[in-house]
Amino acid sequence: MTSRLDTWLIAADNALRTVSGVAHAGRPSPAADAGGPASPEMRRASGPLMRVNHVGEVCAQALYEAQGLAARDPGIRAQMQQASREEIDHLAWTAQRLRELGDRPSLLNPLWYAGSFAIGLAAGRAGDAWSLGFLVETERQVEQHLASHMERLPADDHASRAIVEQMKADEARHADEAQAAGAAPLPAPLRWAMRVTARVMTATAHRI
């Protein structure tokens, strides 16, 4: 049996691994056979977008970690942990793509992680149904965000587009699974606040 202290130590280790860039994908990158070297134009257009996507995966790790810690039902906790493992793939893929584009992760990643962890813990403590509802809304918004990036990424950046397309499919499935597990619908003001927060984060991460 894992003690509460052990659980929090594992969470701290996961946080350090996430913000330090130590992430190893369990699945091959969708970009593995998706194109050659990036042109200067591609780097300028795709780099900031993939940095934003990498920040989203840093936030996802924090949210899932915190919501899993606060979950009452062991089955829901296991579901959160499984989704988190798949999000680690996204984290590793976007980090690798940033390196290929000659770009860098956001300098504010520790802040993004800490803020998202606090939000995830609050959602988890509200109860499993509300936590799942928060997860559904988050994933739906991320899905829309990734769809907008598919429109903005250069048509010849097949590597970035392949990663984003797979991420989008995974996020949609996570939302569907959370919905099926008993998610409660969130009030409209909360959904609106989540959208505003996400816009602030993406606008900042695009530059910093």
Image: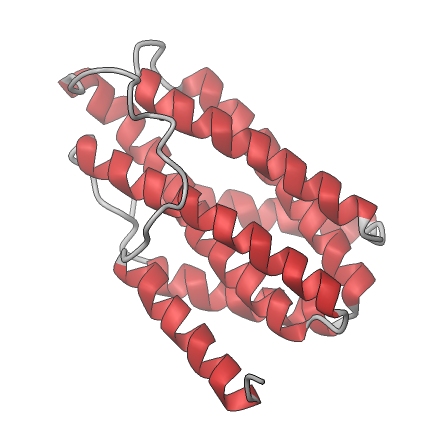
Residue 131 x/y as whole percent: 73, 61
Q: Nearer the viewer, residue 30 or 144?
A: 30
Q: How is the image coloured?
A: secondary structure
Q: Nearer the viewer, residue 163 or 43?
A: 163
Q: Quadrant of residue 48?
A: top left
Give the answer, above or below, for where 121 lies relative to 99: below
* Residue 202, horizontal then vertical, whole percent: 45, 42
Residue 53 coordinates in the image, percent (x, y): 41, 39
Which of the 4 image quadrants contains residue 46? top left
Pick whichever, 171 or 81, lies toward us: 81
Report the side of 73 relative to 165 (left or right): right
Kindly identify the residue that appears in the image at 44 percent across and 76 percent down. 10
- Residue 40 vertical position relative to residue 108 in the rendered view, above or below: above
Numbered marks: total: 0
Would residue 196 appear left or right of 185 to someone viewing this image? Answer: left
Q: Position of residue 92 (x, y in %)?
A: 34, 45
On screen, residue 31 above or below 185: above
Residue 182 in the figure: left or right of residue 90: right
Regarding residue 204, the answer to whether it shows in the image is: no
Tell me: 114 left or right of 73: left
Residue at position x 77%, y 51% in the image:
189
- Give me the residue at 33% from left, 69% from top: 16
